[in-house]
Amino acid sequence: MHCKSLWIKTSAKCINVNVKYMYVELLSVLHFLFSFQNAGDKENMLNILNVLDELLSAGTDRRIHHMISKGGSEALLTALVNSARSFTPNYTILLPLLHLLAKVGYRDRQIGLKAQKADAVLVVLGLLRQNTENSRRAAACLWVLRVFCSSVTTANLLGKNRGLDVVFKLISPHSTKHLRTVNSVLQRFQIYVNCRTAVAKGYIADLLKLYEDWHNNDVNLKNIPIRRALLHCLQCAANSAVGRDALVAEGGISLLFQTTQTCLTMKGLESLVEPAIQLMRKCNPKVPLPLTSDKSVFSFPLPGQPVDDWDADLGLYGKVCNCCLSEDDLETDVNKLRPQPEPDRTLEQLGQYVRLCPELHHDFQDLDSSSEVDESSDDDSTLEGDLNDETQSDQRGSDLPSDRDEHHLHTSDFHKHYLNCSRRGQKGHSSMVDRLLEKYGICIPNHDPRLYAATAANTKSIAGYSILAFPDFWGHLPPQEQEPMAKRPPHVQRKKVFEDIQRLICPEDIINKVIFDMDDHSPQCTPDMCPSSLHFFSKFESGNLRKAIQIRSHEYDLILNADVNSSAFCQWFYFEVSGMVAGVPYRFNIINCEKGNSQYNYGMQPVLYSVRDALEGRPHWVRTGSEISLHIYSHILHSAFSFYTLTFTVMFHHDDDVCYLAYHYPYTYTTLQTHLKMLEKSVDPQKVFFRQQNLCDTLAGNSCSLVTITACPTSRAWKHLPQLRNRPCVVLTARVHPGESNASWVLKGTLEFLCSSDPVAESLREAYIFKIIPMLNPDGVINGNNRCSLTAEDLNRQWLMPDPNLSPTIYHTKGFLYYLNSIGRTPLVFCDYHGHSRKKNVFLYGCSMKETLWQSGSPINTASLKEDPGYRTLAKTLDRIAPAFSFNNCNYLVEKSRASTARVVVWREIGVLRSYTMESTYNGCNQGIYKGLQTGTRELEEMGMKFSQSLLTLRRNAIHYNSRLIHHASALLDLDDRLLDHKSNNCFEDDEPPCMEEIEYSSCSDPFGANELDTEVNGNTSSEEEDEEDADICRDGKQRNNRKSHLVPHYLKQDALETLTIKSGQCNGSNGYLY
Ligand SMILES: [Zn+2]
């Protein structure tokens, strides 16, 4: 006792409660440790360990790291080895030592190597072997071994010495004894499992058996942590391919499926469901897409390139996040943010664009006659002649289908009689069309089915489509009511995963029959051949279904065709489906989508068009589908990224209907060309100057239209012409991305408004010359692409150096803008209309040098830079007048990754201050009067109208105010300061929160942080539960201090504490202990 007191007093001198000196004191204690490496004074050693533990527990990790840096780990390891090697290991010392080593070692990255150097690895394994029956000692050894295993070589060393066998022996089938050991073994076991040995030794099977055993016997649900830990072990095993294969081979998926079904029915087992589902998904064998080649069905020979060359430079666009704004991506080079109005071509080359400004050279001598027929526009008189011919042939026709046939929508007849645009000369066809239109047709503004069919004959698709999709031909009106966003029922994804897993465990239920295949030209599943299947079709403009496989009686896997000349970019879809039974839920899985986290997980639905409904007077695209989920499924094709599966369930309203399903409201190239013809006819040529011209031909030989709209001079008097010629230009473009059909609907709204007789539209025409290129990527739209042109490149990344041969529409749009610039008519506004798949609302992206520099944290003093703040005006106005628009979603940052987009290049090279991308949601709004509703074509068109209206604010001083205009545009012109009610709830919501059911696919992470480990280690010191042994350790748990660890036997500790307390009190005048 004397010796002990003396020693403690000595050490206590060093231990000052003043934390400032703590490190020094720690080191002193360590030196003592060294000194007793060979000594056997149990009490002294315990005291030192106690002091160390108290010191380390009291502070932050910095203390431990400091101790490690001063050789603390080595000292502990040496002490451990020396103590363990003595003839009869003294666990009163060893146990606290192991605990301390676990805590310190956890924070020491080198601990594995240090342990090997000190020969401690096998020593601890030996201790474990000796103590498999003693849960507390075994747990302490396991913690230390786990800490050692942070080094791969240490783990290998353990593996070679059959460490796994020892560990596995500790996991027992269900029992009420040794629960703590089983649990802690399981927690540690995970790290050993992820290796081939585990698989080779059959541990996966054993683990599965154990899981089943605990599942069956843990009826009181008292051991959920053990069951969870078993799952976690399996998850770690499944990190390797061999582990996954073994798990599948051992019937693991089936077992997990069944046990999880039971868990779902019992309260309190929720925590087992999610890990089990993750495990099943992880192990569900990956299969390639059921295609012979993932390349697009369509290839197109590019000028100057061998046909097969495109394969090599397939970009990984699918993995590039287009929504995240990264600060690193912001342009910080001032020179790249300054205007650079040097054309990329010669003035002579710009001369060709003179023809695209007919309004500047027109003499308006013929104001009374109809507008001139441009050489590039289609000759309407020929067209009407064709139709008349057909009408005559109809009258001769004797094989008119009966009324009865019209009610039976057999798709083959349907395509032959109703929708075949290439057979217009044949008998029967147009008569049927005329009869149908006469009987069921509804007046759809600016649409004419006959004109559509005639126009379609001139549309050049790679496949040479001859059949029209009914909705595009027939036309459609927005539904009466706006449609709310779909509610996501709880656990949709879970339900779908279970269904997917059942494919594996009940293969006999799976039909797996190819119903439609674009690659296979032999007649596929015709209604006669497969009377019980749905029928699919997509060989029409913008259609892109490649393959349909029946999985179960009412479930189909669908594969989309990749963009032409590529094997990627799938997202847009448009196809026809028929042969359905009404009221039955059909599940569709589009299994090769490339973007995750789209609005489909946030209330967005695909759209559906029913021919039967249309013929009954309801020609609407409606939002449809329930149980919608976009998630990663097992299919894998590219090694670089996973595909997503969009799954949704549709209940059709009519038997044997012909329906169309699409990603969003389709808007084909033929729709645009038809619409432009209708518009041209609709305007009063005395008032509206409307010209459609050919900007250039596309690669496939389609015309890229440029439309000019402005007001004709009020009189033919020569003095009015200069007024016209001085109007500033507004240049609008859209649909560079074919999958963004919403952009076309917005642009349709703009075009129709600008051609209307609304007084604001009149004022706009008098204020501006509009130059509109409504479809920058006709070939992409026609052939059902999602993102690219025929070159398999994103045309909106070609603006810096557009290739005249490969990207003609961009090359000439840019050339035309340079031309306007060269004649001193730089546009006042440029806006490129787009669709955004991950955000709600409509918003603008603009360009601001100052905001970019400021946001990027650039050291450049932005105060000295001059910038016209006028780039913000339009967004402010739109926020006031356009219900779908959200000012808060706008930004004006210039990103490096966007350096070659229209917005940035037009801003910087053409010098347009107000150069924008307008993004429209595919889904709906989360603010304003449309909050919670999905947008329809009506709202998209309204947005286009509002955008044109907002332009008036830029010319407030130049316009001619009359009473009609003031009445219509008081809010617009800021004459009325009242807040508009649709903005009553303009809250800011940024990007979507992560989907509630997002499933973690990262590799098995260590679920135990340092604090968790400490808590466990501390808990192991005095467990009431199964302290059958260690009689020399006091079990009095009542005096435990929960904030600190309890490494040392209580009776010793109390002595030490008392002495130290007195000492420290004496030293500092404080009565606290180490705090
Ligand atoms: Zn886009």
Image: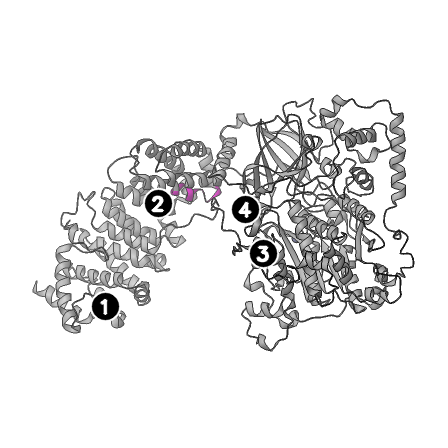
Q: Nearer the viewer, residue 576 or 717?
A: 717
**Sequence-earlier tag: 4 or 1:** 1
Looking at the rendered structure, the kind of residue marked 4 is Gly
Q: Which residues are magenta?
A: 232-241
**Chain-order first, disc 3 or disc 2:** 2
Q: Amino acid at mark 2?
A: Phe
Q: Residue furthest bottom?
A: 864
Of mark 1 and mark 3, the one earlier in the sequence is 1
Where residue 932 is drawn, which disc sits there?
4
Q: CA distance from mark 1 to mark 2?
A: 35 Å
Residue identifier under label 2: 189
Q: Residue furthest right?
A: 365
> Ligand 1: does it lie within 8 Å of the C-beta at label 3?
no
Q: Which mark is residue 376?
A: none
Q: Is residue 803 visible?
A: no
The answer to whether 752 is drawn above or below residue 286 in the figure is below
Instruction: Name the residue that disc number 1 marks.
Output: 31
